[in-house]
Structure formats: structure tokens, C-alpha cells
Image: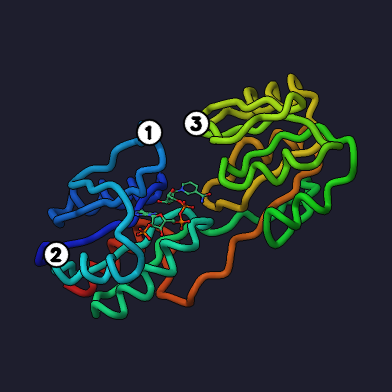
Amino acid sequence: MRPKRILILGGTGLARAAAAALVARGHHVMSSLAGVTQNPLLPAGHLRVGGFGGAEGLTTYLRDDKFDLVVDATHAFAAQISRHAAVAAMQANTPLVRLEAAPWMALPQDTWTQVADVDAAVSVIGPGHKLVVTVGRKEISKFFARNDLSGVARMIEPPQIEIPTRWQVVLERPPFTLESEIDFLREHGATMLISKNAGGPRPAKLDAAAALNIPVIIVARPETLVVDRIATVDELLGRLAREG
Ligand code: NAP
């Protein structure tokens, strides 16, 4: 197979797995990170960091560097870059695939309320709950704004806003074990867990919540443009092998 020039829009474990697999097969791989995490886990191959300057900037980048393929492996909740990728790939006439892990599905032992977005999550929570919130830092202020809620916000990078005294921010990076997640929920007296439906392997926090009978609010993924979608690195490799 002819080695291809592949741009991976990354920031996820799946993107790093794709980079490793494609580099191992001799492709020229450029991974792109937004630059929002200070010490990111680094992918195999080449790396560039920072925004492109919108869909137009990405179009220019794709044209100038003559990529054969764009793999949008960004997080399911990074909707803006995915929109830009769809527009830019069309404008630059570069094939695009969306590599996105399958969403989590509720199991019989789960007590989930599935909501459309973080605003809906905030509005369905009854007063007085002690929350464990794992939705990242971008929208955490929406939970902080409710005076009748308290709890722990767990994230990788600290938020750039004031943290109310009722709240604690814990900086930690996955993976976590079932035991440590049960301990975490117990230690903080959680009465509810809030999570985005990131998808991929079911995380231990969901099993821990089920084991402790703690209800979970699951925020569904944002709508994105319809693009060619695959869920695993193996599917991506199979497709490249077929195309030759
Ligand atoms: P976003 O809202 O979709 O994107 C905001 C802007 O950041 C984009 O317009 C783009 O700037 C730049 N950008 C985003 N991803 C980029 C990438 N991979 N390479 C270069 N520029 C990128 O994204 P976000 O929610 O802030 O997420 C940023 C990064 O963190 C993504 O790479 C994503 O995979 C990762 N991440 C996000 C979440 C989440 O919950 N949102 C969770 C885990 C990891 P320009 O318009 O200037 O090109």
C-alpha cells in the first residue's frame, strides 16, 4: 500500500491509538491538538498544536500540506472542530472520516436520566444534591451557579473561574478503577453523578454509580454534520487497506 499523508484531529485516546497504528504501517501521520491541555499525552508521528483559524484556516492547511485523508478523531463533544473539519475537507476536496467511539448504552443495573445538553442536566437536578460532575471545565460554571447544589467537579485542567466554597475541584486524569471510583463517590458523599456520553469502553464511574445505587445524568452528544463515520481503529485500517 502506498504510504498516505494523514491528518488526525486529536485530543482523545482513540486518536492516539489511530496515530500509533497508522505510523506502524508506514503512513505519514500529523496529529493536531487544540493546545488546551498543558501536558497532553503525545501521539506517535508528527505533532502540531493550536487552532487552524476556523474552517478557512483548516482548508488552507489541508491544501498546502496535500493530505490524502483527514481523520476527525476529536472528542464527541468538540462539536466546533468537527464542523470545521467537515466544511474544510469538502472545500479542499480531501476525504474525511469521523472516528468516533460508539456511545455508552444504559445497562439494566443503571439509573440514568439522559438529557440533550449540559443546560438540561443542570435544570433536571433537584435541590440539595451532592454532585460528582465529570463534564470537563468548559461548562462547569452552570453547576456552580445553582446555590442549592454542592459537590465535586473532577477534570484534567483547572477552570479559570472562581470556585464556590460549596464545591471542590479535583484534578485527575482517567483511567480509574472500579474500586477507586466507588471510594471516590463514597468519600464525597455523592448523591448523583453527571457525565457526558463520551462513548468507548464503559468507564468505571458508571459501574461504581450502579453499584452504589447512585443516579446518573448522562449528557447526550451534540448533533454534528453527517459525515462518513467509523467507530474503531481496525475499521480505519481496513478501509485504508481496501483503498490501496
Ligand atoms: P471545540 O469547541 O470543537 O473547538 C474549539 C476550537 O479549538 C476549534 O474551532 C479549533 O480552533 C480548536 N481545536 C479544537 N480541536 C482541535 C484540534 N484537534 N486541533 C487543532 N485545533 C483544534 O473543541 P473543545 O471542546 O474545546 O476541545 C478541544 C480539544 O480537546 C479537542 O481536540 C478535543 O478532542 C479535546 N477534548 C474535548 C473534550 C470535550 O468534552 N469537549 C473532552 C476531551 C478532549 P480553530 O477554529 O482556530 O481551528
Q: Residue at x 36, y 31 (%)?
A: 39
Which label lies toward us, 3 or 1?
Answer: 1
Badge 2 crowding class, 10 Å Cα cut-off, few under 14, some 14 to 19, many 20 or more, is few
Tag 1: amino acid: Gln
Direction front: furthest residue? 162
Circle 3: residue type:
Arg
Q: CA distance from mark 3 to mark 1?
A: 12 Å
| Residue 60 locus on image (x, y percent) | 21, 69
Residue bearing mark 1: 38
Q: In terms of secondary structure, where does tag 2 sit?
A: loop
Q: How many C-alpha atoms fall within 10 Å of the one at disc 3: few (<14), some, or many (≥20)?
A: few
Which quadrant would the N terminus be assigned to in this image? bottom left
For label 3, the residue is 173
Q: Which residue is mark 2?
A: 65
Residue nearest the observer in this picture, 23 or 51: 51
Q: Distance from label 1 to label 2 (Cα)?
A: 26 Å
Q: Secondary structure at mark 3?
A: loop
Up-down: is 207 above or below 117?
above
Mark 1 surroundings: few (<14), some (14-19) or many (≥20) residues within 10 A: few
Q: Is residue 192 left or right of residue 12?
A: right
**Residue nearest the observer in this picture, 166 or 18:** 166
Q: Earlier in the sequence, mark 1 or mark 2?
A: 1
Residue 134, position as x, y percentages in the image: 63, 39
Left or right, 142 with respect to 75, comes to right
